[in-house]
């Protein structure tokens, strides 16, 4: 039996680091200056020891150079550079693995999720919440279709999933060290982080807020990417699509039997000759579509199993730059420069 057990170390790896802020980035060079200024201003007012974990997810613009420059001059920054673009779920996993704070805040670099809410999140954490979810009350700067599709998706996912995922919540949230360790015990490769945050089942608080437009740059999420993410969430936390396909096959077979009986009755009792070609082509087309759809759904789940059996790492780290203070280690440096670590692989 492979059960999730409590293995929370008594001593935090970060020593006196109370707060880590994990920020995954992909081609975000336009927003980095404003992001860094706003977040550091908020964190300075908190009067707590903190670190910023900036994860470059294989960016192709100036993002890596800007992160490197920040890490060289700010001892509170841990810069993680992935070997290529692994996607946001992989970058989040990497950021959580390198965060050392007693509390970890996850947020995007585009400042749609205001860092000014971090003090309120910290208050809920100190009251005993292991997970503080930020529920979007409004989503400014987004199209009507995107808002409505996201609204209905969360409710559909909750309806078919065994895990209750807080609706209208993104990745913007706070995790306690206990929650981070719980997530690190989940070894699956196909990761839908919003579902995993809910799956661990630790005490959760919810804060509502108004999401803002992007400060700079453009979104990296087109509708196809959002659809793929939604489908990933559904197939990761529910087998309902397989059951729907099975039910659809049963209904189609039942209707086919009724149609066959109707044809026999018309031919034998009413003397009506069978109208062959149009009805035959229609039935073949319908049945072929249902079969292909069902095979495709089965193939999606088989493909997930195939990727899991390969046991490939979720991400690979190319370099890490961190200061002794941010890592909770005494490096003996007095020049404020960050040490650089090189990795060949990470889980």
Image (cartoon, rainbow, N blue to C red):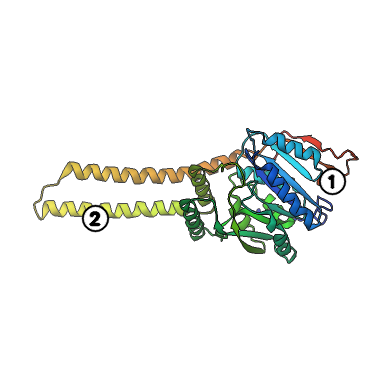
Q: Residue at x 10, y 55 (%)?
A: 269
Instruction: Identify which residue, 141 or 163, lies in the foreground.
Output: 141
The image quadrant of residue 95 is top right
Residue 79 versus residue 164: which sits nearer the camera? 79
- Residue at 43% x, 54% y: name it: 243
**Which mark is on residue 112?**
none
Q: Residues within 10 Å of mark 1 (few under 14, many from 20)?
A: many
Residue 5 visible in the snapshot: no
Helix, strand or loop at label 1? It is helix
Position of residue 19 in the picture relative to residue 275 (left or right)? right
> In the rendering, at what x and y percent does residue 14 appear?
81, 50
The quadrant the C terminus occupies is: top right
In the displayed orientation, state which residue is furthest to the bottom. 127
Query: Residues under labels 1 and 2: Cα distance?
Result: 74 Å
| SS at mark 2 in the image | helix
Please tell me which residue is depicted at 67% across the width and 61% down the height of the picture: 202
Within the image, what quadrant is residue 123 found in?
bottom right
Q: Position of residue 289 (x, y in %)?
A: 34, 44
With 197 as the anchor, is 177 left or right in this view?
right
- Above or below for 59 versus 3: above
Q: Pointer 1: what residue?
A: 325
Cβ–Cβ under 8 Å for marks 1 and 2:
no
Q: Residues within 10 Å of mark 2 (few under 14, many from 20)?
A: few
Number of marks in the rendered image: 2
Mark 1 or mark 2: which is in front? 1
Spot occupied by residue 104 in the image (x, y as percentages of width and height): 72, 53
Q: Which quadrant holds the N terminus?
A: bottom right
| Residue at image mark 2 | 258
First of labels 1, 2 by sequence position: 2
x and y, in percent, of residue 222 in the image: 51, 43
Residue 335 visible in the shown view: yes
Which residue lies at the image location 54% right of the left edge and 43% below the top edge?
A: 221
């Amino acid at each position: 039996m492979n059960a999730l057990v409590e293995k929370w170390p008594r001593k935090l790896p970060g020593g006196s680091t109370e707060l880590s802020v994990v920020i995954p980035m992909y081609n975000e060079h336009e927003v980095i200056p404003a992001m860094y200024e706003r977040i550091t201003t908020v964190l300075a007012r908190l009067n707590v020891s903190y670190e910023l974990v900036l994860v470059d997810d294989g960016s192709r613009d100036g993002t890596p150079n800007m992160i490197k420059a920040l890490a060289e001059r700010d001892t509170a920054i841990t810069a993680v550079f992935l070997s290529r673009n692994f996607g946001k779920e992989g970058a989040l996993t990497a950021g959580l693995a390198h965060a050392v704070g007693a509390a970890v805040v996850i947020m995007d670099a585009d400042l749609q999720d205001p860092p000014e809410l971090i003090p309120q999140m910290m208050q809920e954490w100190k009251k005993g919440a292991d997970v503080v979810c930020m529920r979007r009350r409004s989503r400014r700067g987004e199209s009507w279709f995107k808002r409505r599709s996201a609204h209905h998706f969360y409710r559909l996912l909750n309806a078919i999933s065994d895990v209750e995922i807080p609706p209208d919540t993104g990745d913007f949230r706070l995790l306690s060290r206990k929650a981070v360790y719980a997530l690190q015990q989940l070894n699956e490769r196909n990761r839908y982080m919003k579902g995993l945050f809910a799956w661990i089942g630790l005490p959760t608080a919810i804060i509502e807020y108004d999401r803002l437009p992007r400060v700079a740059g453009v979104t990296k999420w087109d509708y196809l990417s959002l659809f793929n993410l939604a489908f990933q969430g559904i197939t990761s936390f529910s087998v309902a699509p397989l059951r729907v396909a099975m039910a659809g096959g049963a209904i189609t077979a039942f209707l086919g039997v009724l149609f066959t009986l109707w044809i026999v009755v018309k031919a034998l009792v009413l003397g009506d000759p069978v109208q062959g070609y149009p009805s035959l082509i229609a039935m073949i087309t319908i049945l072929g579509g249902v079969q292909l759809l069902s095979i495709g759904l089965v193939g999606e789940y088989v493909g997930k199993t195939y990727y899991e059996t390969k046991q490939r790492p979720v991400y690979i780290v190319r370099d890490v730059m961190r200061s002794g203070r941010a890592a909770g280690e005494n490096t003996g440096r007095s020049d404020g420069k960050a040490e650089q670590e090189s990795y060949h692989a990470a889980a």
